[in-house]
Image (cartoon, helix red, strand yellow):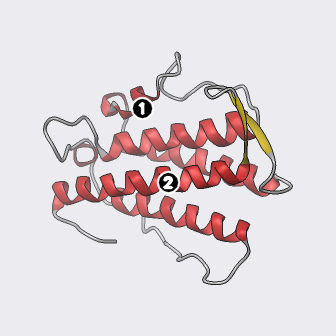
Amino acid sequence: MTTERIGPPLRAGERETLRAFLDFHRATLAMKCEGLTDDELRQRAVPTSDLTLLGLLRHLAEVERAWFRRVIDAQDVPLLWSADGDYQQAYDPSGSTGAEAFAAWQREVEHSRRIERAAASLDVTGHQARWGEDVSLRLVMLHMMHEYARHNGHADLLREAVDGSVGV
Protein backbone atom coordinates (compact mmCIF):
# COMPACT_ATOMS: atom_id res chain seq x y z
CA MET A 1 0.00 0.00 0.00
CA THR A 2 1.24 3.46 -0.84
CA THR A 3 -0.18 6.42 1.02
CA GLU A 4 -0.81 9.58 -0.94
CA ARG A 5 -0.15 12.70 1.07
CA ILE A 6 -1.57 15.90 -0.38
CA GLY A 7 -0.30 19.23 0.87
CA PRO A 8 -2.84 21.68 2.31
CA PRO A 9 -4.14 24.43 0.02
CA LEU A 10 -2.27 27.71 0.07
CA ARG A 11 -5.45 29.77 -0.22
CA ALA A 12 -8.70 28.32 1.07
CA GLY A 13 -11.39 28.87 3.65
CA GLU A 14 -10.93 27.98 7.29
CA ARG A 15 -12.78 24.67 7.20
CA GLU A 16 -11.12 23.39 4.04
CA THR A 17 -7.71 24.37 5.42
CA LEU A 18 -8.31 22.66 8.77
CA ARG A 19 -9.60 19.53 7.02
CA ALA A 20 -6.60 19.43 4.68
CA PHE A 21 -4.02 19.92 7.44
CA LEU A 22 -5.63 17.18 9.54
CA ASP A 23 -5.63 14.79 6.56
CA PHE A 24 -2.00 15.72 5.85
CA HIS A 25 -1.05 14.70 9.38
CA ARG A 26 -3.11 11.50 9.15
CA ALA A 27 -1.31 10.58 5.93
CA THR A 28 2.04 11.30 7.57
CA LEU A 29 1.31 8.75 10.30
CA ALA A 30 0.28 6.17 7.69
CA MET A 31 3.50 6.79 5.74
CA LYS A 32 5.61 6.30 8.87
CA CYS A 33 4.00 2.88 9.42
CA GLU A 34 3.97 1.71 5.81
CA GLY A 35 5.82 -1.42 4.81
CA LEU A 36 6.70 -2.57 8.34
CA THR A 37 6.12 -5.98 9.87
CA ASP A 38 4.25 -6.42 13.15
CA ASP A 39 7.56 -6.90 14.95
CA GLU A 40 8.92 -3.68 13.43
CA LEU A 41 5.73 -1.80 14.37
CA ARG A 42 6.27 -3.00 17.96
CA GLN A 43 9.91 -1.86 18.09
CA ARG A 44 10.81 0.86 20.59
CA ALA A 45 13.19 3.70 19.83
CA VAL A 46 14.25 3.98 23.46
CA PRO A 47 14.45 0.94 25.75
CA THR A 48 12.90 2.83 28.66
CA SER A 49 9.86 3.89 26.63
CA ASP A 50 6.79 1.80 25.81
CA LEU A 51 6.06 3.94 22.73
CA THR A 52 5.81 2.07 19.40
CA LEU A 53 4.36 2.82 15.99
CA LEU A 54 1.70 0.17 16.59
CA GLY A 55 0.83 1.82 19.89
CA LEU A 56 0.58 5.20 18.18
CA LEU A 57 -1.84 3.80 15.58
CA ARG A 58 -3.99 2.36 18.35
CA HIS A 59 -3.82 5.55 20.41
CA LEU A 60 -4.77 7.79 17.50
CA ALA A 61 -7.68 5.49 16.58
CA GLU A 62 -8.86 5.93 20.16
CA VAL A 63 -8.43 9.70 20.05
CA GLU A 64 -10.32 10.01 16.72
CA ARG A 65 -13.13 7.90 18.21
CA ALA A 66 -13.29 9.91 21.42
CA TRP A 67 -13.29 13.40 19.92
CA PHE A 68 -15.42 12.93 16.84
CA ARG A 69 -17.81 10.09 17.70
CA ARG A 70 -18.17 10.52 21.47
CA VAL A 71 -17.81 14.30 21.82
CA ILE A 72 -19.04 15.91 18.58
CA ASP A 73 -21.54 13.23 17.49
CA ALA A 74 -22.60 12.28 21.08
CA GLN A 75 -22.38 8.56 20.28
CA ASP A 76 -22.48 6.25 23.25
CA VAL A 77 -19.60 4.05 22.11
CA PRO A 78 -16.90 2.58 24.35
CA LEU A 79 -13.22 3.15 23.83
CA LEU A 80 -11.64 0.52 21.60
CA TRP A 81 -9.03 -0.84 24.00
CA SER A 82 -10.19 0.13 27.46
CA ALA A 83 -13.41 -0.64 29.25
CA ASP A 84 -12.57 1.86 32.02
CA GLY A 85 -11.55 4.88 29.90
CA ASP A 86 -7.78 4.48 30.27
CA TYR A 87 -6.32 5.91 27.07
CA GLN A 88 -2.88 4.56 28.01
CA GLN A 89 -4.02 0.99 27.32
CA ALA A 90 -4.04 1.75 23.59
CA TYR A 91 -0.25 2.16 23.70
CA ASP A 92 0.18 -1.53 24.59
CA PRO A 93 0.66 -3.23 21.21
CA SER A 94 0.76 -6.77 22.56
CA GLY A 95 -2.88 -7.55 21.84
CA SER A 96 -2.99 -6.33 18.25
CA THR A 97 -1.47 -6.84 14.85
CA GLY A 98 -0.50 -4.01 12.55
CA ALA A 99 -3.33 -4.92 10.19
CA GLU A 100 -5.89 -4.85 13.03
CA ALA A 101 -4.63 -1.54 14.40
CA PHE A 102 -4.42 0.08 10.97
CA ALA A 103 -7.95 -1.12 10.09
CA ALA A 104 -9.33 0.25 13.38
CA TRP A 105 -7.54 3.56 12.82
CA GLN A 106 -8.84 3.81 9.24
CA ARG A 107 -12.42 3.07 10.38
CA GLU A 108 -12.22 5.79 13.01
CA VAL A 109 -10.74 8.30 10.55
CA GLU A 110 -13.62 7.60 8.15
CA HIS A 111 -16.16 8.11 10.95
CA SER A 112 -14.40 11.37 11.87
CA ARG A 113 -14.45 12.61 8.28
CA ARG A 114 -18.15 11.77 7.94
CA ILE A 115 -19.02 13.56 11.19
CA GLU A 116 -16.99 16.64 10.28
CA ARG A 117 -18.51 16.88 6.80
CA ALA A 118 -22.05 16.47 8.16
CA ALA A 119 -21.61 19.26 10.72
CA ALA A 120 -23.32 22.50 9.75
CA SER A 121 -20.28 24.57 10.72
CA LEU A 122 -17.11 24.65 12.79
CA ASP A 123 -19.21 26.22 15.53
CA VAL A 124 -21.11 22.96 16.14
CA THR A 125 -20.49 21.88 19.72
CA GLY A 126 -20.30 18.66 21.62
CA HIS A 127 -19.84 17.92 25.28
CA GLN A 128 -16.39 16.88 26.53
CA ALA A 129 -17.35 14.99 29.68
CA ARG A 130 -13.77 14.76 30.96
CA TRP A 131 -13.61 18.55 31.06
CA GLY A 132 -17.27 19.10 31.92
CA GLU A 133 -17.44 21.63 29.07
CA ASP A 134 -18.91 22.03 25.60
CA VAL A 135 -16.34 22.35 22.82
CA SER A 136 -16.59 23.39 19.18
CA LEU A 137 -15.77 21.30 16.14
CA ARG A 138 -13.13 23.96 15.41
CA LEU A 139 -11.39 23.21 18.72
CA VAL A 140 -11.61 19.46 18.07
CA MET A 141 -10.01 19.78 14.63
CA LEU A 142 -7.24 21.99 16.00
CA HIS A 143 -6.71 19.63 18.93
CA MET A 144 -6.48 16.67 16.52
CA MET A 145 -3.87 18.46 14.41
CA HIS A 146 -1.86 19.13 17.56
CA GLU A 147 -2.23 15.48 18.62
CA TYR A 148 -1.05 14.18 15.25
CA ALA A 149 1.78 16.70 14.91
CA ARG A 150 3.15 15.75 18.33
CA HIS A 151 2.84 12.02 17.71
CA ASN A 152 4.21 12.26 14.18
CA GLY A 153 7.38 13.62 15.75
CA HIS A 154 7.48 10.47 17.85
CA ALA A 155 6.78 8.42 14.72
CA ASP A 156 9.80 10.02 13.00
CA LEU A 157 12.10 8.78 15.76
CA LEU A 158 10.43 5.37 15.97
CA ARG A 159 10.68 4.76 12.21
CA GLU A 160 14.31 5.87 12.16
CA ALA A 161 15.08 3.39 14.95
CA VAL A 162 13.38 0.58 13.00
CA ASP A 163 15.08 0.90 9.62
CA GLY A 164 16.94 4.19 9.40
CA SER A 165 14.21 5.89 7.31
CA VAL A 166 14.04 9.62 7.85
CA GLY A 167 11.85 12.32 6.38
CA VAL A 168 8.63 11.78 4.51
Question: Residue 46's image quarter?
Answer: top left
User: How many numbered circles does the render carry?
Assistant: 2
Identify the image quadrant of residue 92. top left
Farthest residue in the left direction?
47
User: Mark 1 — residue?
Assistant: 90
In the rendered image, the vertical position of residue 167 relative to residue 108, given as above or below: below
Residue at image position (49%, 62%) is 25
Which residue position holds label 2? 146
Q: Where is residue 86 in the image (x, y as percent from the top left)?
A: 47, 23
Nearest the camera: 108 or 73?
73
The percent position of residue 106, horizontal first and vertical second, equals 55, 50
The residue at the point 17 percent across, 55 percent down is: 161
Which sits in the foreground, 164 or 106? 164
Seen in the image, is 45 located left or right of residue 35? Answer: left
Which tag, 1 or 2, sits closer to the chain's start? 1
Q: Position of residue 125 (x, y in %)?
A: 78, 43
* Classed neighbour count for the residue bearing mark 2: other residues with Cα under 10 Å, few (<14), some (14–19), many (≥20): some
